[in-house]
Image (cartoon, coloured by chain):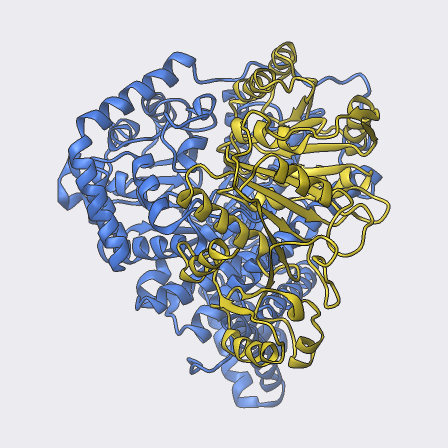
Chain colours: A yellow, B blue
Amino acid sequence: VKTDNILRILTAVPICDGHDSAITTVNLELVRHGIEVVYLGYHRSARDIVRAAIQEDVRAIGISSYNGGHVEFFTELVRRLRRQGAAHIGVFGGGGATISPADARRMKRNGVDEIFFAGTPLADMVEFVRAKYGRARRVAASPGLPTTQNPKPGTRCRVVGLTGPGGAGKTTLMDELVLRWLTKNPRSRIGILSHDPSRAGHGALLGDRAAMIYSQHNRVFMRSLATRGQPGGLAPQTGAWRKRFQQAGFDVVFVETVGTGQEAMPFTRHRVDTAVLVLSPDYGARLQLQKIAMLDVADIVVVNKADAPGARTARAELQQRLARNRHEQKLLLTVAKRHRDPGVDELFDLLQRRD
Amino acid sequence: MVIEDHPMSVLAKVNAAVHRHNRFVQQQARRARTEPAFRKKLMRRWQAVRDGIETVTTPTGLKLPRLALPQTEEPVEVARYLFGEGLPGEFPFVNAAYPRMYMGTAEEPTRLFAGLGLAEDTNKRFHYLTQHQKNIRLSTAFDGPTLYGLDSDAEGVFGKVGEGGVAIDTIEDMERLYAGFPLGDEHFSVSMTINGPAPIILAMYIASARRRFGPNIVPKLRGTVQADILKEVQAQNEIIFPLDASLRFLTDMVEWSTAQMPRWYPISISGYHIAEAGATPVQQAAFTLSNGFTYVELFRARGLEVNDFGPRLSFFLDVGLDIEYLALARVCRKLWAIGMRDVFGANQRAQLLKLHTQTSGRTLIAHEFKNNLTRTAVELMLGCINATNSCHSNSADEPFTTPSEEYVRLAAHAQAILLEETGLFQHMINALGSSPGMHIVERAVQEAILAEFAELDRLGGVLAAIEHRYQRSQIQASALRYELQIQDGTRAVIGLNRYRDPSERIPEVTVVRAPRRNKQRQIDRLQQFKRRHARQAARELDKLAAVVERGGNVFAQLIGAVEHCSLGQITARLFELVGRYRPSV
């Protein structure tokens, strides 16, 4: 048992609501004040929000609602948290014009901690979050991981590492792989360790969940980790989490690093079964290609956004570059944003087959 | 003059065309100074324009010219005005899209926005609002599930059914929504604020009109569907299919409506939501116009004629309190006209930027909310000075409640006071245009917009910039700066960070809500519809899927599919085929 003194909260916008301008501003302000914010994005159901909050072991859920139906929505959140044994996770929120003081009173009676009205200074909101949820607490060694399912004997947990520069499409690619895993292996359980950088002296915005569609699923357990000052693209708790997934009998774990630079070799200390380097065709001049250290050790190199100009040149250059390495490496072209992309299918087959 | 295709992107071409036009104006000014024959001809024309202006008499007996022109005999200035701004209704339409501006407009510039609860509730409200009106212009708001293409019985949406807009699941709801209105009448038009599922909703509208009036009704239908998918990705987030698929469905709809519905506006290119999400006025204009040019490029790539669909494009902008709004719409009209004429070879009808303006919701606050009446009035005035073709003014109570009848009425009357009661807009066309300050703002705004075009071009154009999250991150940065400026007081908000009344409390109001039993009723009848149509629905969905896979025009198929399928059934099938939109943070 150790003490966790970094405050983590989860924020989201309810289902059928796309008004994310306010929450985006609030997120940045919370991060600036040292808070780690797991952002789930907009148009999210109560079920997805509660699942994510439990998996991420946050102290509270902050909801920005605009399109009405907030009394039902907030109440459903509180009810689901209680039903799933997570009543310790607080719920607060705001809705600018749309939540009346009478609604707010009702919502508080139903278990919501606080509702902010239009015109509340950001500073007041930050102060509330810190005062209400900011006390250091003792945490169990393995919070959150589902313990009901016993590890199936004989299954081996495959660990797939995804790395590459920011903007190459790692998160999208991972989500598409998860979709295929879920459909092809109807009982498999999938772990995701997703990393985002902490801002120097600040918190972190952990935003990968917001861009994920298929990973919001009961058979997927995702944990967003902030680097908390550790260089190399992973976080201090990465190793421990990986072990937990293995012990709990997960079939596959995806480890997605932060966007990395040329020198990064994130999977030397944290071994993975398959290391995938994801690049977009605009990685820069050929000279730059020579310097990317991961190219020497990656098992699979993916050129994502292969529909973009320069993809063919990129493939030719990479082929030349990889030919110099002595071990066998695969080079694939994908368009992860395209539904049912054959390149992603190929990558999925390759990852499944590998042992 | 049409520029031949070369590797330059559309925005780079627009930039070049605007610079060329500005050089052309300078050149005309120089000729006015140096070429006596040119000068003579120019001044003869100027004289003719002035002689042609009728004289009007105000209620106080003052005699005034119908059209306000710069009071100058200086040929250089005359050349700058006639070529650089154009008379109202003349290229490049800086002063106005049409020569008569607010004189003798046949239709009220007001649209009546409504949408709440079930279709029959909204229908009743529409009838109430329009009971004394000759021209009926309905504007429809949809509830969250409809905006996201979900049925009312989808998991987790119960609380949202009928909130903030009307719940539409099936063609039968659509029939109820506009029951009793003469859909094909030339004095009737309808506007539908929906984007992601817009093609399905418009298909329901067409199919329901056919049910009531027969197939000949279709070419007579008048109205607008917002359907601006690019601004959804950049700001409003109500997109449901991946961008490529969304753009394909949109183009299918535009292709069909251009051919079959000559009086329909199949897209409203909107900056309003971009500005409300936090964009600066310049960002609003630059992103909206660049989105517009992107649509034109897409529709032409489909083989559509710019002169066919060009006149069916319209724009929707925000007007706030920043000084840019003194001239923002003027600059937009100019850039659009030049781009359409010089880059796409459009004729005059397709060069016009027809503009609906709405006053800014973001500038309104809950504290001492009656100040919002003043804010909205000033914004309205800025909108009218910029010759917007129609306007919606917000209700002062919007920051804390669903607009009440009292404040909706005050907001509508603010427009009437401005246009009908004050003398500013009813005697003289363009009385307030072309002031020195306006010109200075125009030039600064134009340069800033062109610089933004250049940046978008560097990123590979609008679609590539979207992939880089460029527009989103720019809008978010501006939103944060705006909030911080309010916090540190560099941006004054009266009653909030200045002259605040410490004893003031936000008024307690009762908000209109859709009752629980109505939500349940909607779900019950939706499920009945699904049971009744189960067999045909499966067949229609298969036909639809075949068209999607084959690459045919999906819209034509949708008009048949909505006879038997609900909104959610159609989107669910399309999700399987083309995937879901992946949110961008």
Instruction: Name the spot of residue A56 as percent of width and height, x first.
Output: 66, 33
B23 sits to left or right of B48: right
Residue A89 higher or lower than B334, as above or below = above
- Give the quarter of the image for residue B19: bottom right
Q: Position of residue B379 (x, y in %)?
A: 61, 42
Say which quarter of the image contains residue B536: top left
Q: Position of residue A208 (x, y in %)?
A: 62, 46
- The answer to whether residue B185 is seen in the rendering is yes
Give the side of residue A31 with respect to residue B206, left or right. Answer: right
Image check: A11 left or right of B156? right
From this view, report whether residue A339 is shown above or below residue B487.
below
In this view, A204 is above or below B394 = below
Q: Position of residue B268 (x, y in %)?
A: 43, 50
Q: Residue furthest front?
A: A154
Q: Nearer the viewer, residue B465 or B109?
A: B465
Residue shown at the point (66%, 76%) measured from the top left: A289
Name above or below for residue B477 compared with residue B168.
below
Q: On the rendered structure, is B321 left or right of B517?
A: right
- Quadrant of the image containing the N terminus of chain B: bottom left
Q: Residue at x 37, y 62 (%)?
A: B310
